[in-house]
Image (spheres, coloured by chain):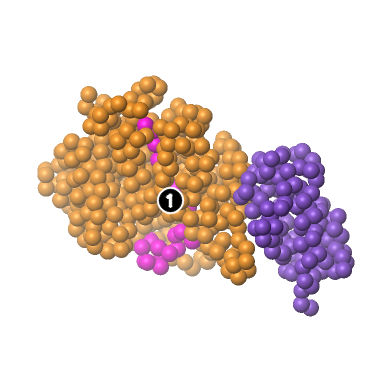
Chain colours: A orange, B purple
Amino acid sequence: MNAVPFSLRRVVITGLGFVTPIGNDRSTVTAHLRAGRHGLAPVVFLGNPNLPVKVAGTVKDFTVDSTSWRDWRWPAEYEIPRETLRGLAPHGVYALCAVMQALRDAGLSEEAVAGDDATGLFCASAGSAMMLHHNLAQLHAVRGERGNPMGVVSSIAGTLNFNLAAHFRITGAVCGFVSACASASHALGYACDEIQLGRLRRVIVVGAEELNAETLLPFAAMRALSSASDPVLASRPFDQGRDGFVGAGGAVVLILEEAGLAAERGARIQAEVAGWGQAADGHSMAVSHPGGAGLRLAMQRALAQSGVKPGEVDYVNAHGTSTQVGDRAEALALRSLFTEAGARPRVSSTKALTGHPLSLAGAMEAAFCVLALTEGFIPGNPHLVTPDPACEGLDLPRAAVDRAPRIVLNNSSGFGGSNVCHVLRTPAESPA
Amino acid sequence: MASLLGKMLPPSVSDSIAQLQRFPLEIRDAYRSFRSTGDIAALHMVVLAVVRDYMPQPAETPLTDEMRLIEDLGYDSLAVAETVFFLEDLLQVRIENKELLQVRTVGELRGFVTRKVEQKPPAAA
């Protein structure tokens, strides 16, 4: 087992996989982030053009809108056996492809992780409301007399962990995380802990989300979604005129490894997770604390674990979903932590480009932070015209900044006042 | 009796044909033939096609009665359950867990489904 003491064990990121509204590979995603090019498209749900949901962050080159896997299509470069397909939810297809892509990016074969007791799999997913609804409707139609044997594994909140662990023959550990829009950030945070504790040496961190009527429309009922039909106006985090978030789907995967393992196999170290923190609002089941108290404490804890001072942070990838209350709370938390300490990191919410993929958000944006660190740029806020006065003093660049950040923060907040923050840094910044 | 078998199966033929949409035309025709004439040979064709359709690792080898679902065809218990669920829905029969335990080969499944369909009480007119 790993003999390195806890305090010296470092967690590094060696692979990324993307199935997102702004691209299904690393270079396309990077190009969109650099250019400020969004991936939102017109949508009609339930055949009803009158719904106040007009655009969404759609996933391209995948067709998974049917409840039958036999109708699904995905890019030819990924081979998915029937044995695996039969138990998947639609977002499981995104996730499976993103894992394959991330393993390749990390220089790992599927054989290398299969049956390896040092490799774990942590997933974030809310399950598939569409599959659940379909399966239960079938069950009701026959008064409970029979049901789809794959109904449970293809729909409930653990669907990603069940299926991916079986497909990739994961033996180290498998676990799922459900904290709404902070889910994938929790998966990443606890993956770091498992590696630092020496229980695992590698964790495949997966976030995925479906984009369909069953997932998204319940948020319209909460009046949380933008009703704008112009993508540029629909998702505009921190803008005074924002009117709600734009839904999105996809999957993103990060391969986390203990630095020693990455070095042993000569892997390319893309970034280090210097630390993470979490805290809760204690305020509302769905609405952020008005002053962003929980998020501020989560950021403080992440910085403390990392040994990083506010003034050393170059960039914050904000949660910023484009809702009135949430963006304001985050702006106040950022001001309280940074502005009051005389620090002025660049801040942007990439949800302007992607929309908000709920459970997936934390993993997707952590991976965007890794791209910023490795490719040497800071994503901008291309849809921001008039910043909310709550943002006074924050540096919210409109266009991407052509400057390499060294230390970045990734924020996530979920229902129930769940807040998570990661600190990532370039390997060069890591203490010896 | 046999000639009535197909006719007493709810729901309508067109609903059931929709369930068979992914199967080749000859299988859908066989099902129609079973439903209109009670032709058991036609029903067997459908059962074999369903067995092949749910194999976790598809293969083109011809299916024989002696083949064991799990040992020879790569079925696992979930695939058995999927096959049974599909046949229950298609043929409007109910198959109990303890009955399932007695079905190990393709031939046993074929015979079992035939008996199930024959036992089925006639639907109300």
Kindly give the residue lying farthest to the bottom in the view shown. Answer: B125
Depth order, front residue of B45/A128: B45
Q: Residue furthest left?
A: A341
Whether residue A59 is situated above or below residue A367 in the rendered picture: below
Start and end of the magenta stretch? A201-226
- Position of residue A112 relative to residue B43, above or below, is above
| Residue wearing tag 1 | A125
Residue depicted at 36% across the width and 26% down the height: A261
Subunit ID for the residue under disc 1: A
Badge 1 marks a residue whose secondary structure is loop
Rendered location of residue A223, percent (x, y): 37, 66
Which residue occupies the foreground of this view, A165 or A55?
A165
Q: What residue type is disc 1 on?
A: Ser
Left or right, A289 with respect to A114, comes to left
Decide whether residue A220 is among the magenta residues: yes
Assign the N terminus of chain A to one quadrant of the image: top left
Badge 1: residue crowd in 10 Å (few <14, some 14–19, many ≥20): many
Quadrant containing the C terminus of chain A in the rendered view: top left
- Whether residue A190 appears in this view of the structure is yes
